[in-house]
Image (spheres, rainbow, N blue to C red):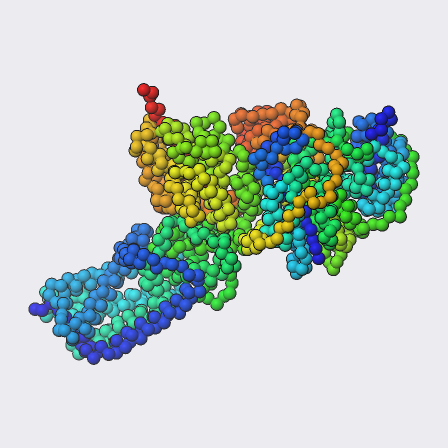
């Protein structure tokens, strides 16, 4: 028997006219819906996300088809991925049918939905549909029965679930009624390749053929109109993400992670710095709000949200969307709220986990720029004082700049002003230079360089704050002032290589300073030490220790340095027990986003929460790689009263304690 | 209305001060400089008055010293002052309050200001004389230690801070010379548009040699750290040891600890 | 300074809200240190004459106002013309620093402000936030001096002054409306036996809880310096210093306080002063009986822990 089916069986080929008319109408409605939204995206400032188009398309296809970002959350992620593939296959199936039945067959008498291919086709689509229904049931149970905390459910969700279920079910019903007439009992070899249809069909066998034909026709049109309704509804509901998320993959930020546009201070035409209204953001920022499906993953990862601060990255995106598409003329600050804006630590966990590739962080930074640069407003007086100290003393503590190099007294290290002929410039940063606890890290690093025979100098009192904390708090002017002075100095000395013990300095000198003209390679000491070890310049005498490791945000998520520090610790003799949230899922210490300078007044302490997580591992030692984290953890351990059970050390200190000195000749 | 604000650039007070070669003032090497804190309140008060009067008044910012004082002039311009005057005098730190006041009075006298604001004293020398001396030279009333200011239809109600927190209330009309005290207001942080605008504002330079000079009325003969009284003891060392030692002392000095 | 004759000083006394201020006796003490012949000037009242038997140039405060710098200046100049002193000595107070330069300007003579000690030639004054000292020598025959409050021991010799009434027809450039009292003090630090005081060195507002905890553990009160109050970390009623409360508890713990002169003025008479500071050279070290060089926050925490243990075990 022929393995094929008569398309338009029972409804007749004449339906081509109305279905195309309705189809075009539905698509027109959809297009119009999107057109209206495009007008709103265009309220935003221009931004070039159309360069390197082939790379963009590749990324879009990869992210969309593999669902890799969605699968970052294994449970619901798998459900969605399966649904996507299932529904996708069904959609492709329908397209293939349309291509054959409306074009290839009538025009060229070509049929490919036959034989083995058609059997495979039928089986695949049945499985796809079946999986889709099962998975959709799972998603329905999650949303309406389990009800995860914080998941917003509204009328739209009821509508979409109903619509999707009915499309799938009517699809199988149509297949069933058709098979009941054309395949069951007639072409069992073929029928078995549509198992669900077969099952459905059996239910209708009792009907007379006339009744069956009528039921089939009704179901066919019902299925058709539901599908058309689906198409028309897309731009008006969450379903728009079907287009907006792949588009967001297409428009992804191809720049380095954490990059934010340097304001051109010479441009006299700029009257608004930062974002006060939606129109101050870019079109992509507004478009992001349409890609959001309120899945809540960003909120779940946010350290501020998890310590009862009023910041939810998801809400910020929604509020920007409300402001863009709504009637309210309220500025962004009024809608989002200053407490939420200032609570962000720029840890990037939200962006990292977002399946829609939404860029949360820079929107908040632009709002901060408006607050600081246009209104002179700060989260608290401590930040204002820190800014003034940075202007006067080039460090946030208000300590005399002349003492910045004092920590190196007595150590085998020179300053650039005396000896610039070195392999490496060690950019110590404010904390390592002035903070008592962090000076130990700087000293450890020098000891390591000495042991490895690396000739290193520091800028000493000429060094100024890298500018990262003020930049992340929105003070772009202060950042550019201090950065340009550092850059001039570094260039003046003809520095070839920079190493730093602070991930914030690392990101700033290595990435941000590129926009201001610095081209020198910058390394973080963790990979630098890994290089010394693998190159044989440094050998360690491993001494066994149990520890847990904190991936700092600016080293892990921002710079993808996750494995190297662990390898170094292993070589040092460490036995690692990972925290539940580690690697890319690491939980911020609370000091990023310039918040190291601010007072934490809302909610509970982020550093305390992270210290709890470290304690849970049972390890007696917490190892970190960032001066802010070290400061936060020392503080958190003290506040929690855990001094007997948990100690914190920097990776440099561990390595320095285990240097195997080379025996002399 | 023409308002003058006089500001001084002083070193950051957390600096380590060492006597200069002559031993009569601090060595300027490696110091961090900033605007005198008391003068910041003066700048802010002038700007608040300007805002109150619909931006009509013109605020001039004056500072005396070497080129580095341009930084404090620019800061005041960035806060919102209209124009700057730099009296170039690299030797200003060697001049006594009488000479400094004379320079200010000479300049101000020619311009005819309605109001002058300055800090009640400088953080480095702290003689608290310049403002009052300049006012006397100009022959205009002076109110010191300003912690409250209101301007109503040409009449100023000023509050002076007295010992114990009491305020003395005074009423008078321009021209007046004010010296400002901490607590008068909260100086604004310059916004970026104002910083950029300020780069275009005029800063006029006057060579101090072009102004009539006066002889100093007093002379500084020494600059040195205070002699240690010697009666107190200094404890230092590891934290826990210090805490234990301190507990011993407290036990002897505090009844509550003995209980 | 005339040679061969004793030094002459004119002391400018202070009168406020109907009372002769005690600082007036510090002027007498200072003059005694100089070994000078003293005369006094006062805008005050016959009913409140100083306990001192010297020549007093008195102007009526009822007529000329307790505060009226222009008129007071004229009256002082009249006294100066008659007395021809070598030094005109004021207290470095809100009255003194306001009035002294006007007198100096009118006479074109030197002024030395806030004298803290006598020097071999000239006078020693503080500078750079009290961290350093200068010696200043007047270059004029006469000079105006203002002396630091609370530094020179007051002297009340007793007796009744010989009063010479002064009048003037000068004009005033301002109108003195009156006094406004300070805010109600909910806390009377003056009664506390132990005060734990916070300075900028405690770092941030949240650390004030450590100060409060320590004060409670020691059975004392919390005090603060002006910058801490201005920063909003603590209410004004707890401010100790020239413009806050003057205290003299048996035990004063200055935590993270540098020792600016305005604060010292308010607490240096305390029985036993312990200062906790990272800076060896902080001016507080001059008045402290014990200076502990440590991180304020860490040491406070360590003390609180120990005190908790002692109360737990008792």
- Vertical side of A416 occupied by A71: above or below: below
- The residue closer to the viewer here, C163 or A123, is C163
- Evaluate whether residue C189 shows in this view: no
Q: What x and y, as percent, mark residue C149?
A: 74, 35
| Quarter holding residue A43 | bottom left
Identify the residue shown where x is 13% and y is 70%. A111
B211 or C13: nearer the eye?
Answer: B211
Determine whether, in the image, residue A83 is placed left or right of residue A110.
right
**Residue A110 figure quarter:** bottom left
Relative to C39, A328 lies left or right: left
Q: Quadrant of the N terminus of chain B?
A: bottom right
Q: Residue at x 40, y 69 (%)?
A: A36
**Quick check: B146 above or below C126?**
below
- Left or right: A9 in relation to B34: left
Quarter of the image with the C terminus of chain B is: top right
Q: Quadrant of residue A238?
A: bottom left
Relative image position of residue A298 (x, y in whole percent): 39, 53
Q: How many marks?
A: 0
Q: Nearer the viewer, residue A648 or B201?
A: B201
In this view of the protein, which residue sits in the foreground, B37 or A306? B37
How far across and how far down the image is residue A177, in percent? 19, 71
| Spot occupied by residue C279 in the image (x, y as percentages of width and height) | 58, 31
Q: Residue at x 73, y 51 (%)?
A: B110
């Amino acid at each position: 028997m022929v393995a094929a089916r008569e398309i338009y069986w029972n409804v007749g080929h004449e339906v081509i006219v109305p279905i195309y008319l309705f189809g075009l109408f539905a698509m027109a409605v959809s297009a119009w819906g999107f057109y209206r939204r495009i007008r709103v995206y265009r309220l935003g400032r221009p931004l070039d996300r159309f360069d390197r188009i082939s790379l963009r398309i590749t990324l879009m296809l990869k992210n969309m088809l593999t669902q890799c970002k969605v699968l970052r959350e294994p449970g619901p992620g798998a459900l969605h991925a399966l649904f996507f593939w299932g529904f996708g296959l069904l959609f492709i199936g329908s397209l293939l049918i349309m291509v054959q039945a409306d074009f290839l067959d009538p025009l060229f008498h070509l049929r490919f939905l036959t034989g083995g291919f058609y059997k495979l086709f039928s089986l695949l689509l049945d499985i796809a549909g079946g999986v889709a229904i099962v998975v959709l049931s799972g998603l329905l149970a999650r949303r309406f029965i389990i009800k995860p905390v914080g998941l917003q459910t509204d009328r739209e969700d009821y509508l979409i679930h109903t619509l999707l279920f009915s499309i799938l079910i009517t699809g199988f019903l149509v297949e069933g009624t058709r098979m009941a007439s054309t395949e069951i009992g007639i072409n069992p070899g073929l029928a078995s390749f549509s198992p669900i249809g077969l099952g459905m069909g059996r239910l209708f066998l009792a009907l007379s053929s006339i009744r069956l034909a009528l039921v089939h026709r009704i179901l066919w049109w019902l299925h058709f109109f539901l599908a058309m309704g689906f198409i028309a509804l897309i731009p008006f509901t969450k379903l728009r993400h079907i287009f907006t998320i792949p588009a967001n993959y297409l428009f992804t930020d191809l720049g380095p992670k954490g990059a934010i546009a340097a304001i051109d201070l010479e441009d006299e035409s700029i009257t608004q710095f930062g974002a006060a209204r939606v129109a101050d953001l870019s079109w992509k920022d507004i478009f992001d709000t349409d890609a959001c499906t309120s899945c809540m993953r960003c909120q779940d990862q946010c350290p501020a949200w998890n310590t009862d601060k009023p910041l939810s990255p998801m809400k910020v995106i929604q509020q920007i969307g409300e402001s863009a598409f709504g009637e309210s003329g309220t500025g962004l600050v009024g809608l989002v709220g200053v407490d939420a804006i200032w609570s962000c630590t720029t840890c990037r966990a939200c962006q990292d986990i977002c399946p829609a590739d939404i860029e949360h962080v820079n929107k908040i930074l632009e709002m901060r720029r408006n607050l600081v640069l246009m209104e002179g407003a700060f989260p608290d007086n401590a930040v204002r004082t820190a800014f003034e100290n940075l202007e006067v003393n080039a460090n946030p503590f208000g300590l005399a700049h002349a003492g910045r190099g004092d920590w190196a007294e007595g150590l085998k290290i020179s300053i650039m002003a005396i000896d610039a002929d070195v392999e490496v410039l060690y950019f110590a940063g404010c904390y390592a230079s002035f903070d008592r606890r962090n000076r130990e890290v700087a000293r450890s690093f020098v000891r390591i360089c000495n042991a490895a025979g690396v000739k290193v100098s520091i800028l000493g009192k000429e060094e100024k704050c890298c500018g990262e904390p003020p930049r992340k708090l929105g003070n772009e002017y202060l950042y550019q002032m201090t950065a340009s002075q550092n850059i001039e100095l570094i260039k003046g000395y003809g520095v070839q290589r920079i190493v730093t013990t602070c991930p914030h300095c690392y990101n700033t000198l290595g990435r941000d300073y590129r926009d201001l003209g610095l081209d020198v390679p910058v390394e973080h000491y963790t990979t630098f030490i890994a290089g010394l070890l693998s190159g044989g310049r440094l050998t360690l005498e491993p001494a066994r220790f149990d520890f847990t490791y904190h991936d700092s945000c600016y080293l892990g998520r921002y710079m993808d340095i996750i494995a190297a520090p662990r390898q170094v610790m292993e070589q040092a003799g460490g036995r690692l027990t990972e925290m539940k949230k580690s690697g890319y899922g690491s939980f911020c210490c609370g000091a990023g986003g310039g918040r190291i300078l601010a007072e934490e007044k809302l909610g509970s302490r982020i550093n305390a929460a992270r210290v709890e997580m470290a304690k849970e591992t049972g390890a007696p030692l917490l190892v970190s790689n960032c001066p802010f984290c070290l400061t936060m953890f020392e503080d958190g351990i003290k506040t929690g009263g855990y001094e007997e059970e948990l100690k914190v050390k920097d990776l440099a200190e561990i390595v320095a304690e285990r240097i195997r000195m080379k025996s002399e000749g | 209305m023409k308002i003058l604000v006089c500001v001084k650039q002083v070193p950051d007070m957390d600096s380590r001060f060492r006597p200069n070669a002559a031993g009569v003032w601090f060595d300027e090497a490696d110091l961090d400089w900033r605007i005198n804190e008391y003068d910041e309140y003066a700048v802010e008060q002038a700007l608040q008055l300007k805002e109150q009067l619909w931006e009509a008044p013109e605020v001039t910012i004056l500072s005396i010293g070497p080129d580095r004082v341009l930084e404090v002039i620019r800061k005041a311009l960035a806060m919102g002052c209209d124009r700057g005057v730099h009296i170039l005098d690299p030797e200003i730190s060697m001049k006594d309050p009488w000479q400094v006041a004379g320079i200010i009075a000479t300049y101000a006298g020619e311009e005819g200001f309605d109001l002058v604001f300055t800090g009640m004293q400088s953080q480095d020398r702290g003689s608290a004389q310049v403002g009052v001396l300049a006012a006397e030279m100009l022959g205009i009333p002076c109110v010191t230690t300003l912690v409250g200011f209101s301007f109503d239809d040409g009449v100023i109600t000023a509050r002076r801070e007295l010992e114990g927190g009491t305020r003395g209330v005074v009423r008078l009309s321009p021209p007046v010379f004010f010296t400002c005290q901490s607590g008068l207001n909260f100086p604004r942080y310059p916004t970026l548009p104002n910083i950029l605008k300020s780069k275009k504002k005029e800063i006029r330079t006057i060579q101090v040699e072009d102004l009539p000079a006066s002889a100093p009325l007093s002379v500084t003969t020494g600059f040195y750290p205070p002699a240690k009284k010697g009666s107190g003891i200094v404890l230092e060392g590891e934290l826990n040891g210090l805490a234990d030692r301190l507990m011993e002392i407290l036990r002897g000095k505090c009844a509550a600890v003995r209980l | 300074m005339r040679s061969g004759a004793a030094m002459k000083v004119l002391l400018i006394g202070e009168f406020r809200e109907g009372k002769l201020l005690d600082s007036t006796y510090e002027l007498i003490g200072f003059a005694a240190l100089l070994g000078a012949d003293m005369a006094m000037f006062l805008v005050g009242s016959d009913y409140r004459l100083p306990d001192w038997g010297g020549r007093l140039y008195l102007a009526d405060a009822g007529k000329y106002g307790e505060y009226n710098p222009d008129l007071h200046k004229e009256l002082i100049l009249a006294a100066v013309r008659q007395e021809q002193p070598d030094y005109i000595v004021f207290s470095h107070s809100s009255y003194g620093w306001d009035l002294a330069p006007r007198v100096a300007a009118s006479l074109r003579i030197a002024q030395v402000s806030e004298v803290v000690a006598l020097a071999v030639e000239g006078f020693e004054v503080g500078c750079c936030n009290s961290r350093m000292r200068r010696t200043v020598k007047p270059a004029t025959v006469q000079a105006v001096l203002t002396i630091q409050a609370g530094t020179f021991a007051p002297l009340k010799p007793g007796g009744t002054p010989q009063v010479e009434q002064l009048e003037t027809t000068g004009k005033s450039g301002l109108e003195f409306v009156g006094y406004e009292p300070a805010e109600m003090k909910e806390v009377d630090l003056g009664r506390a036996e132990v005060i734990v005081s916070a300075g900028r060195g405690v770092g941030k507002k949240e650390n004030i809880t450590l100060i409060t905890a320590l004060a409670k553990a020691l059975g004392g009160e919390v005090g603060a310096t002006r910058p801490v109050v201005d920063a909003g970390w603590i209410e004004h009623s707890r401010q100790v210093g020239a413009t806050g409360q003057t205290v003299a508890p048996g035990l004063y713990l200055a935590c993270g306080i540098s020792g600016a002169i305005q604060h010292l003025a308010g607490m240096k008479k305390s029985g036993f002063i312990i200062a906790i500071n990272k800076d060896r050279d902080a001016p507080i070290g001059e008045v402290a009986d014990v200076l502990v060089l440590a991180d304020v926050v860490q040491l406070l925490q360590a003390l609180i822990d120990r005190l908790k243990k002692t109360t737990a075990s008792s």
